[in-house]
Image (spheres, helix red, strand yellow):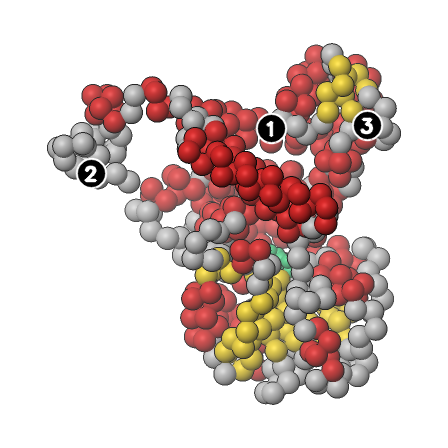
Amino acid sequence: MISAAEGSPNGNSCCQPNGRMDDYAQQAFVDDNIAISPNAPEEVPTLLKRIALHSEAYLTENDENERTKILDAARSLVYALETPREAIIRHCWSQSTLYAALETGVDLGLFTALSQNDKPKTSGQLAAATGADPTMLARILKHLAAMGVITETGPDEYRRTGFSMSMMCNRYSDSYPCMTGCITDGVLALPAQLKKMGYRNPSDGKDCAFQRGFSTPLHFFDFLTENPIHAVQFNNHMSVYHQGRPSWMDVGFYPVLSLVAEANISDHDALLVDMGGSLGHDLSEFRRKWPQVSGRLILQDLPKVVEQARSMNLDPAIELMTHDFFTEQPIKGARAYYMHSVLHDWTDDDCRRILANVIPAMKRGHSKLLLNENVIPSTNAYWETTSLDIIMMADFASTERTEKQWRALVESAGLKITKIWTVRRGVESLIECELA
Ligand SMILES: C[S@@+](CC[C@H](N)C(=O)[O-])C[C@H]1O[C@@H](n2cnc3c(N)ncnc32)[C@H](O)[C@@H]1O
């Protein structure tokens, strides 16, 4: 909020009671030239050089890190070249409309119809294949092409892309109805909720923007239990949102083999207990990447989620178990209790309750707690992490945490952090903890 005196060039009050500047003050501050001039033209040469530099390395070595550096620089280039007016229109027009077009496309089966083969298809053919009105569909297709989601090959004619092909798979395409069904209305209600709460940091997962946006008294996870279709979509979204990111299970990230070798784990010992493990994607990845490793792999989640996981044809080495992590952990003395993107859903007090239920099961000198979470860096945080933080604020009254916040939380629960492994600006870090 700009205070009235701050908002004036000469320190005099220029604001109306709601914090908006009056027309005269606005003119003194912002003439149209600012709104129609590039945001940071002075940064353009450096950014172009950075893109060229990383492109060379990417093209010669096909290095994934170089690819992400090009993407970061390309985004910064867009922000630097874009004018404020263009940014406003991008935020206000393109984001919600692209979303609406995508969700409509998913619901219609448009992407499946388009992506069956590489042949371009007319809007009329796609309308016939999906049963949609041809005039309406032509407009949706034009916008999807204008936004770079599908390729326009001629007037009213389109070809599939890698994106449209990914949309043929429910695990990916469910992200869109999932957001509409149980996330976005909470985010959209955030400004009004923050205003009502006097702009305090939300701290009650049963009284935050989520309840306002979805007109429900329920906590997010109780809402999912009551809405099984959204629950399935949410679990599918969980199974894909981190695909392709570096993973702690990759060689060279976390010492997976010493986790096993140092403790002499046999086939009867519990190696990994994945608490709130959703559909078992992490344990499946572990099994795929470390098939030779002995020890039990146990997937725990709420009953409905475990039910969905049972239908997924998981590797038979993965044991499924219903467990509410607000109750005592039944698997005692496991080598590692693992939680991926779980504690970020909960306030510090709730996290301490969850941890208090694991601690009695941990064996001193043997058991580790592995928290696979974002660790927000003090500068240059990644936009995926900050987006998720605002979702956490809106829908869970919880937070993505900095290293300092993780240390304070873990120590207050009676544990200690032994080491944090982290890559790519804190995304997908692994926080290893032991009994204090
Ligand atoms: C944000 S998701 C993370 C899922 C998975 N670990 C991942 O990273 O993809 C949180 C998970 O916690 C589960 N969960 C929520 N409340 C729970 C509870 N009381 N006991 C056990 N699991 C719970 C949800 O069903 C969901 O699968």
Residue, disc 3: 113
Give percent across and percent down for residue 102: 66, 30
Q: Earlier in the sequence, mark 2 or mark 1?
A: 2
Residue, disc 2: 6
From mark 2 to mark 1, how far is it between C-alphas?
A: 37 Å
Choose between 102 and 305: the one closer to the eye: 102
Ligand 1 positioned in quadrant: bottom right
- At a point 54% along the width and 36% down the height, the residue shown is 48
- At a point 14% along the width and 32% down the height, the residue shown is 10
Residue 89 versus residue 44 in the image, above or below: above
Q: Earlier in the sequence, mark 3 or mark 1?
A: 1
Residue, disc 1: 98
Residue 85 versus residue 284 in the image, above or below: above
| Quadrant hosting residue 42 | top left
- At a point 55% along the width and 26% down the height, the residue shown is 94
Residue 360's tag is none
Residue 400 versus residue 421 in the image, above or below: above
- At a point 49% along the width and 35% down the height, the residue shown is 45
Q: Earlier in the sequence, mark 2 or mark 3?
A: 2
Q: How many residues crowd around disc 2 within 10 Å: few (fewer than 14), some, or many (20 or more)?
A: some
Q: Looking at the picture, which amino acid does disc 2 mark? A: Glu
Q: How many residues crowd around disc 1 within 10 Å: few (fewer than 14), some, or many (20 or more)?
A: some
